[in-house]
Image (tube, rainbow, N blue to C red):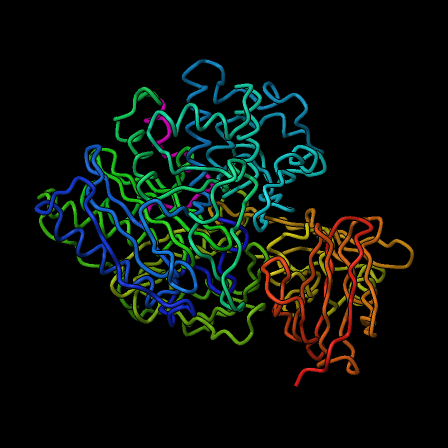
Amino acid sequence: MRTRFAIPAATLALTLLAPTAATATGTAAATATTPNGSSAAYDATRKAAAEKADLLTKSYGTTSVQYALIDDGDIVVSGQSGLNDEKGQKPLTADTLYGIGSTSKMFTTVAVMQLVDQGKIDLDTPVVQYIPEFTMKDERYKKITPRMLLNHSSGLNGSSLTNAFLFEDKDTFAHDTLLKQLANQTLKADPGAYSVYCNDGFTLAEILVERVSGMDFTSYIHRFITEPLGMSDTKTPLDSPNAAKMAGLYYPSYQGQLPNETVNVIGTGGIYSTAEDLVRFSRIFTGQAEEVLSDNSVEAMEQDEYKTPLWPDEADNSIEYGLGWDSVDLYPFGEYGIQALTKGGDTILYHASLVVLPDQDMAAAVVSSGGSSATDQLLANEMLLQALKEKGKIAEFKPEKSYGKPVKADMPESVLQYAGIYGASNQTMKVEISPSGELSLSTEQAPDYPAEKYEYSADGNFRSADGNTMIRFVTEENGRTYLWTRQYASLPGLGQTALSLYSAEKLQPRELSAETAAAWAKREGKKYYLLNEKHTSLAYLLMPTLQLNLSKQLPGYVLDKPITGPNTASSELQIPGLYGRDLSGYTFYAEDGVEYLDASGSLFVAEDAVKPIYVAKKSAATIPSSGYAKWYTVSDKDAGKTVKVNAPANGSFAVYDEKGTCVYFSVIGGDSKVALPAKGTVVFAGEAGSRFEISLQERSA
């Protein structure tokens, strides 16, 4: 799924991953096969696919990749590249399973549309008619329809993902509690006003399928989608797939292979599959599986649902929503007069992309461990373009595009009004404009990141020196001013993609009362530690702390969130597309003199309440009756000491260095002895009352 972790923090465009050194797991030679045994057809496509897949694993941070191409119902190219397990003893095969993240949303969309075909769902009837207990604090929720869930225009805030990302744990908490979580939320926009990427909409659509069909979602998709299409390698966490068949997972800052990742909002991002199964799935969209979905529903899914009043003018793009689809007109295929549909997916560790050419009866799928859906999509694009050329459908590859270098011109003085602070989801950026026409763009959350420079050009846009990025300011009918970014992004050997989105919204300073300003000043620079993730959560591998930094550039803000009271802050962005997704609020409260922070369902405790761990020959830590994780700091006198921890069956512990990098997480495995880093932290997580026995070992060298 495209999660909140997937949005770049220090750029305005959907910047593709820059070439990096190969991961610590290394790469292996790519393999490519033709399942039908033909050696004559698609030779050039197979060769190109293998070379580019190998490039992904050697130069673009991808551990392993699997790919397939289907033409007129036959899988004609299939292969894989990279390393699977650490020791290289389990080769990658065509049936190695990968998480497909948000590509799972297409299964949810098909399921809804099947029920539309049967007359059991009307796309424009309010969801409350099907799920009566669906309620929110905001009365506008009664206007949300199934169509709005599928085209991202519901107005829901974004992602309620507490306990959704777990290691080898199929706990359904995130799915089961969604309605309860939504009941405490308001909407960020009128339903249907504009489309902005929203995970919760698809979990709600998953629940819709279950309520209307009377079946759990996993059983439903197997009976009505995977089995009819012969997709025997498509599973969900509830199928308990064989861990030995899963692609090996790794995390850049952690040594060793990780357990399998389960994403327990299945209809949003929790399905496992293979590249070959995904192209079998694509037959629905090329008119070759009418027994699964009607032509009318397939065509309805391909319509340009993103075209609401709040959307940038037409330009080459990779984000133009249909029903389920990320784009119904994917660049660069329009350059050849060909419609392309795409859906990508990113979990924390898995990535996927499906690209379908409905009028050509062709599709390509790429799945990977490591990397990104963006690079997977580029590989899928290149495979399809090569196959189209090999078939004679296109004569030559089109050259890559650019907006052209700036053409020097005098900038109208009125443009200076657009300077100021702009916000996007969880970030702010400073736009400076000089009278001579130079624009500088910097990100407050990444002060060491070089400012981006643009020059005013004769057509009224600001352009980068290389001509690949163009920026313009647009004031919409809602009175808000947006930074419109258009970009062509290329990766050597993998081709080019395009993006055209409102990437930020202009913010205005807020005056705070003396009481409110004083309350927030006390929190400046404080760290808050995550409490309510399950002991198997990937959050403990990541950075489970939140440091509160008030904006220095924009009074009255923390990140993109205006401060609304002594204990509250809430984002008010209205940005279509990607950069207004996953909006969150902060609510502080105190219990027994301890301050807590609720950030959209994630609960944190202030650093003041985190005490040094007691290290003795024998000691213990016990999870309180609340079930919240127990955090400790490492004092100077205990730094370097080695401890051994006996954890209960339903508990885990993790150790972090001074920078917050996880150096040990017991769920991943290994020796339970660990040296305590200087100025580090330790967390224990588990069920209420769980007791962790800690014994002092020898001091590490």
Q: Position of residue 495 (x, y in %)?
A: 26, 58
**Quadrant of the image occupied by residue 336:** top left
Quadrant showing the C terminus: bottom right
Who's the residue at 17% across and 56% down the image?
Answer: 47
- Main SS type for the magenta part? loop
Who's the residue at 55% across and 52% down the image?
Answer: 4
Does the magenta portion include 115? no
Who is closer to the viewer here, 465 or 20?
Answer: 20
Q: Position of residue 35 (x, y in %)?
A: 21, 42
Who is closer to the viewer here, 414 or 50?
Answer: 50
Q: Looking at the picture, does residue 637 appear above or below residue 257?
A: below
| For residue 412, side relative to residue 201 (left or right) | left
| For residue 693, side relative to residue 331 (left or right) | right
| For residue 138, side relative to residue 50 (left or right) | right
Q: Position of residue 354 (x, y in %)?
A: 34, 43
Q: Looking at the picture, does residue 646 appear above or below residue 283?
A: below
Who is closer to the viewer here, 400 or 20?
Answer: 20
Q: Looking at the picture, does residue 87 appear above or below residue 90?
A: below
The answer to whether residue 16 of the structure is visible from this angle is no
Q: Position of residue 405 (x, y in %)?
A: 28, 68
Who's the residue at 79% across and 52% down the image?
Answer: 690
Q: Residue furthest right?
A: 592
* Residues drawn in magenta: 297-316
Q: Residue furthest top?
A: 119
Does the magenta portion include 310? yes
